Image: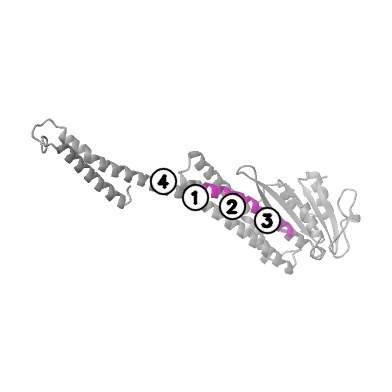
Amino acid sequence: MSIIAARRYSNGTADDNALRLDGIPAAEGPPHSFDWIGLYEPSDAEMDLVRQQYGLHPLAVEDALNPRQLPKVEIYGRTLFVVARTADLLVGEDIAYGQTALFVGPGFLISVRFGSMRAHTELRQQLETQAERLAEGPDYVLHAVLDFIVDGYLPLLDGLDNIAQEMEEAAIDVFPEQSVIRRIFRLRRQLRRFERVIGPMEEMVERLVIAELPCIDPGARIWFRDVLDHVRRAMARMRSLKETLAAIVETASLLEQHRQGEMTRSLAAWAAILAVPTAIAGIYGMNFDYLPELHWRYGYFAVWGVIVAICGGLWLRFRSIGWL
């Protein structure tokens, strides 16, 4: 059985005696109690067992077993069906996506997890130390699971942010190589997919905040508002990363054009300076007997003095305007 954990909570306290041999609590519990069942990649037969025990709608069960759903909220009678998407940064820059489907009904919460390796065990242990919060019912646990999923986006965004900063700093010194440019476009493609897959989380959580939904107490909406704020911050960071990656190539191109312009000005200045001795030497290299100062004793030194004076003046001029 793919049940990771299954417990019944009465007034916020776990009641392990309510478990059956198959690991699922009895269908009906005492007042102020609820069951929290955690499943990881269950088979059709295992999911059908849970469906019969808690009266889940077949369409919702079908969606829960399909790990390619987009985030959404649906109502099936008195049961609320929520789909959330998880995201983890793999080695390198690839993003692995998972899905967590949640059934919230009168007296139960069932989570069906696909893909993500971040189990809810630690979250469950943390909540069990807060009996007064756990006693509020399955809607509070729904908030806690969604908040746990959204907080999992932060390490991913931090990792991508560090990669983008490294690229940005390297682009200031030298124009990116072709392999780096391909890497930038791969990252931008990853972020576009992140926005397409995770983006609907914002709309889904917003519906939990503002809509009248079964099994969601009006007093619990403030908790979902906090999750919504976290989702919006994550999406804002993602969009900022997209803009940063787009600006890296543009900024690198501008800096490279500036470096090329400086190099061109420097070469033009040296060409102008070297043109002076070249022109004078060319004139005195012509085969004529009657040239100025050709037979003058100090003619050679005078010509060198003129060359040095003109070249020095040009060097000072180009230096003053920043060409050298």
| Residue 254: percent from left, percent from top | 41, 49
Q: Position of residue 107 (x, y in %)?
A: 82, 61
Question: What's the distance in space between the residues labelled 2 and 1, CA to CA?
Answer: 16 Å
- Mark 2–mark 3 Cα distance, whole angstroms, equals 16 Å
The rendered magenta stretch, by its main secondary structure, is classed as: helix
Q: Foreground mark, 4 or 2? A: 4
Mark 2 or 3: the one toward you: 3
Q: Are marks 2 and 3 in contact (CB under 8 Å)?
A: no
Element assignment for label 3:
helix
Q: Which mark is residue 246?
A: 1
On whether residue 180 falls in the magenta region, the answer is no
What amino acid is labelled 4 in the image?
A: Glu
Badge 2 is on which residue?
195
Q: CA distance from mark 3 to mark 1?
A: 26 Å
Q: Can you identify the residue that label 3 sits on?
A: 151
Secondary structure of residue under mark 2:
helix
Give the magenta part as a residue range: 144-167
The residue under label 4 is 256
Q: Earlier in the sequence, mark 4 or mark 2?
A: 2
